[in-house]
C-alpha cells in the first residue's frame, strides 16, 4: 500500500524538481552569463550590461559615477565635433552664458598678483548699491582669506555668484583707506548683455556689435535699432566677428527684422528631425534699411545663419573673412542628476540650399580642431586667392550670384588681416599679457585723475601727453623683455592702440573701447564705404546662364513657400543651439 502511494507522488516530485531546476538554471545563467547574452543579442543594452559586469565582477572597487562621467564625453565624441556632455557642476555656468541674467554681486573683475581686483561695478547691481567701486580689491569673503595662489577665475566666480537673495560678506582693500572695509551684499539678478556696442558711427550710419545669440539678444537688438532710428540712421553695420553663435531661434528672429514677408531664413533637417522651414513674417522693423554684415573665422553657427540668410536673399553685403563653418544643430537634453548633453539632431541649410558645415570625421578629428590654424598657415587670412571653394557645392542667391557650401560663409568682399606694424617685440609683450597688466596698474594708480574724462576723445588727448609708451617699455624691461628700439618704433602705432584701448576699456567701458578700435579697423571702414556709396545692396551678375539658374531657384523658392510649415520660431518650446 505504501509503495503504491510512493509511485503515485513520483510524477509530482519529478515535475517540481524540473521547475526548481529551471529556476536555479535561470538564476545562474542570469548571474554569470546573462550579461554576455545581453551583449551578444542587443547592442542597445551593451553599455548597461558592461557597467553591471564591471560593478559586479571587476577585481577592484570602482567608482561607477566617476566612470560614467568619464565615459559620456568619450561616447559623444565619437559622433561629431559638436555633440557634447556637460557635467552637473558646469551646466549652470554654461547655460548662463546664453541666458539674459545670472545671480551674483554685480562686478567685473580680474585677478592680478593673486588678488581679485574689481574692474567695474555693474550699474544698478547689488555691489553698486552698497558702495563697491572700481579699483577695490576683494581680500576676504565671509571672514575667510580670499587671496593666494589657489585663487583663479573659476573659484572666484563660484564664490561670488550664488542664489538670488543670499548674502555674502566682502572684505575690501581700497586705495584711499588704510584699513579693510567690509560690505554685506545681497546677491541679485545681474543682466548679461550680448549687444556689446550700438552707436552712430557717422552722422548717417549706425553700428551694432553682437557677441552671442542669447535668449535676450533679439530684444537687445530691437532696443539698439530703436535708439539708432531715433538718430535718423540710414544704414547699419552688424558686426558678428568673433560671435561663436548660440540659440538658433535668436538668429531667426533677428534676421526677420531685415527681410520682407515670405523670404526663407533657414531650414533644418535630420534623420528623426522633420524638415522645418523658417520664413520672414513681414513684421520686421528694418526691411529696407541698407545693411552690411561683418564676419571672420570665429563667426560660427547662429552667426552663419544670420549672414547666410542676408547673403542668399541678396538683402545686404557680407564683409570680412570666411566664417567658421558650423552647420550642425544641437538640442539640449537634461538628466535628472543635473547634467546634460547637447546632441546634434539636424543640419541647417541657408535659403539657397547649402550646408555650410565644414568636413569632419567621426571621433577625434585633429584636422577639424586645427582647421582655423591651418587656414592661417595656408595664408587664407591674408589672401582670398588661397581659398579654394568646391565647385560641386555651388549654389545661387536669389539674384543668381554664386555662393558655396561645405565650409563657412565666404564674404562678398574679402578684407585681409592687417599685419602692418607687427614685430617680434609686439608679439612677445602680447603673449606675456604685459600690455594688459601694465594698463591695469596704470589705471589703478591714476583712477582719480582719469575719471575726470567722460569720453574717449578727451581721455585720449590726456593720455597722449603722458609718455605712456615709454612707461610701458620700462615696465616690460622689469618683466625681462629687452628694449628693442627699432622694433618698438615699427610697432609704435599698434602699441599705442592697444595700450590706449585697454585704458579706455578700464575707465569708460566696452562700447567706448570698441568705438576707439573701430576708427582704424579696415573691415569696419570697408563696410562704411559701401554704405556711403550706396552699394550695400548686391547686384545681379551680368551672365545669362547664371540668370537662368537664378530663375530656376526662384521657382524652387516659390514651391518651398507653398509648403511652408505653420510652426513658427516664436511658437517653439525647445531652444536649439547652432
Image (cartoon, rainbow, N blue to C red):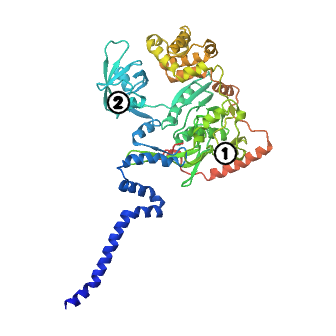
Q: Is residue 358 above or below residue 31?
A: above
- Quarter of the figure that contains the N terminus: bottom left
Question: In the picture shown, does residue 381 fall above or below 496?
Answer: below
Name the residue rendered at 62%, 25% in the picture: 205
Viewer-nearest residue: 170 or 151 = 151
Can see residue 122? no
Label tally: 2
Give the label on residue 187, or none.
2
Q: Position of residue 342 (x, y in %)?
A: 48, 45
Most extreme residue toward the bottom, as rendered? Answer: 1
Which residue reaches farthest right? 544
Q: Which mark is residue 395?
A: none
Image position, residue 457 (x, y; %): 56, 14
Farthest-out residue, front: 59
Left or right of residue 507, residue 380 in this image: right
Residue 412 seen: yes
- Which of 205 and 1 lies nearest the eye of the viewer? 1
Q: Which mark is residue 352?
A: 1
Work out which residue is located at the far left of the displayed protein and give it.
1
> In the rendered structure, which disc, 1 or 2, sits on the residue that comes first in sequence?
2
CA separation in Å, label 1 and label 2? 48 Å
Q: Position of residue 122 (x, y in %)?
A: 42, 25
Q: Residue at x 54, y 55 (%)?
A: 272
Tag 1's secondary structure?
A: loop
Q: Residue at x 42, y 42 (%)?
A: 87
Q: Quadrant of residue 368?
A: top right
Give the class, few, some or many, for how many residues have Cα within 10 Å of label 1's Cα (few <14, many ≥20).
Answer: many
Check the picture and name the quadrant holding the C terminus.
top right
Amino acid at each position: 500500500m505504501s509503495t503504491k502511494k510512493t509511485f503515485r507522488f513520483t510524477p509530482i516530485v519529478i515535475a517540481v524538481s524540473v521547475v526548481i531546476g529551471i529556476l536555479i538554471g535561470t538564476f545562474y545563467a542570469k548571474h554569470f552569463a546573462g550579461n554576455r547574452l545581453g551583449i551578444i543579442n542587443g547592442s542597445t543594452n551593451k553599455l548597461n550590461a558592461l557597467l553591471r559586469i564591471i560593478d559586479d565582477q571587476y577585481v577592484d572597487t570602482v567608482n561607477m559615477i566617476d566612470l560614467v562621467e568619464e565615459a559620456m564625453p568619450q561616447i559623444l565624441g565619437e559622433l561629431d565635433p559638436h555633440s557634447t556632455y556637460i557635467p552637473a557642476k558646469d551646466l549652470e555656468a554654461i547655460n548662463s552664458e546664453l541666458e539674459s541674467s545670472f545671480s551674483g554681486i554685480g562686478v567685473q573683475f580680474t585677478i592680478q598678483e593673486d588678488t581679485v581686483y574689481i574692474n567695474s561695478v555693474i550699474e544698478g547691481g547689488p555691489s553698486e548699491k552698497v558702495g563697491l567701486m572700481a579699483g577695490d580689491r576683494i581680500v576676504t569673503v565671509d571672514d575667510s582669506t580670499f587671496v593666494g595662489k589657489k585663487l583663479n577665475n573659476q573659484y572666484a566666480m563660484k564664490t561670488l555668484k550664488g542664489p538670488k537673495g543670499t548674502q555674502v560678506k566682502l572684505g575690501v582693500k581700497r586705495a584711499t583707506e588704510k584699513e579693510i572695509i567690509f560690505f554685506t551684499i545681497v546677491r541679485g539678478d545681474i543682466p548679461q548683455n550680448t549687444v556689446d556696442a550700438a552707436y552712430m558711427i557717422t552722422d548717417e550710419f549706425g553700428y551694432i556689435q553682437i557677441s552671442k545669440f542669447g535668449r535676450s539678444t533679439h530684444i537687445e537688438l530691437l532696443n539698439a535699432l530703436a535708439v539708432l532710428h531715433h538718430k535718423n540712421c540710414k544704414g547699419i553695420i552688424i558686426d558678428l566677428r568673433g560671435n561663436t553663435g548660440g540659440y538658433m531661434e535668436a538668429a531667426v528672429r533677428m534676421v526677420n527684422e531685415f527681410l520682407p514677408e515670405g523670404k526663407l531664413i533657414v531650414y533644418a533637417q535630420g534623420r528623426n528631425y522633420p524638415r522645418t522651414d523658417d520664413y520672414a513674417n513681414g513684421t520686421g522693423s528694418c526691411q529696407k534699411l541698407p545693411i552690411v554684415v561683418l564676419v571672420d573665422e570665429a563667426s560660427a553657427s547662429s552667426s552663419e545663419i544670420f549672414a547666410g540668410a542676408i547673403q542668399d536673399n541678396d538683402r545686404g553685403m557680407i564683409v570680412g573673412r570666411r566664417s567658421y563653418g558650423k552647420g550642425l544643430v544641437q538640442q539640449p537634453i537634461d538628466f535628472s542628476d543635473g547634467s546634460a548633453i547637447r546632441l546634434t539632431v539636424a543640419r541647417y541649410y541657408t535659403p539657397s540650399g547649402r550646408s555650410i558645415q565644414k568636413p569632419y570625421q567621426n571621433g577625434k578629428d585633429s584636422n577639424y580642431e586645427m582647421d582655423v590654424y591651418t587656414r592661417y598657415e595656408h595664408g587664407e587670412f591674408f589672401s582670398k586667392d588661397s581659398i579654394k571653394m568646391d565647385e560641386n557645392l555651388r549654389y545661387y542667391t536669389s539674384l543668381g550670384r554664386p555662393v558655396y557650401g561645405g565650409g563657412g560663409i565666404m564674404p562678398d568682399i574679402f578684407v585681409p588681416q592687417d599685419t602692418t606694424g607687427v614685430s617680434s617685440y609686439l608679439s612677445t609683450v602680447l603673449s606675456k599679457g604685459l600690455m594688459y597688466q601694465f594698463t591695469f596698474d596704470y589705471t589703478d594708480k591714476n583712477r582719480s585723475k582719469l575719471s575726470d574724462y567722460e569720453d574717449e576723445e578727451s581721455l585720449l588727448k590726456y593720455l597722449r601727453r603722458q609718455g605712456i609708451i615709454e612707461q610701458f617699455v620700462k615696465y616690460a624691461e622689469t618683466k625681462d623683455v629687452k628694449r628693442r628700439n627699432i622694433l618698438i618704433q615699427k610697432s609704435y602705432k599698434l602699441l599705442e592702440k592697444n595700450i590706449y584701448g585697454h585704458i579706455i576699456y578700464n575707465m569708460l567701458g566696452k562700447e567706448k573701447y570698441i568705438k576707439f578700435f573701430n576708427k582704424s579697423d579696415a573691415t569696419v571702414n570697408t563696410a562704411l564705404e559701401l554704405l556711403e556709396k550706396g552699394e550695400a545692396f548686391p547686384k545681379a551678375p551680368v551672365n545669362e546662364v547664371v540668370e537662368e539658374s537664378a530663375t530656376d531657384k526662384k521657382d524652387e523658392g516659390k514651391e518651398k513657400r507653398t509648403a511652408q510649415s505653420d510652426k513658427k520660431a516664436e511658437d517653439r518650446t525647445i531652444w536649439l543651439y547652432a
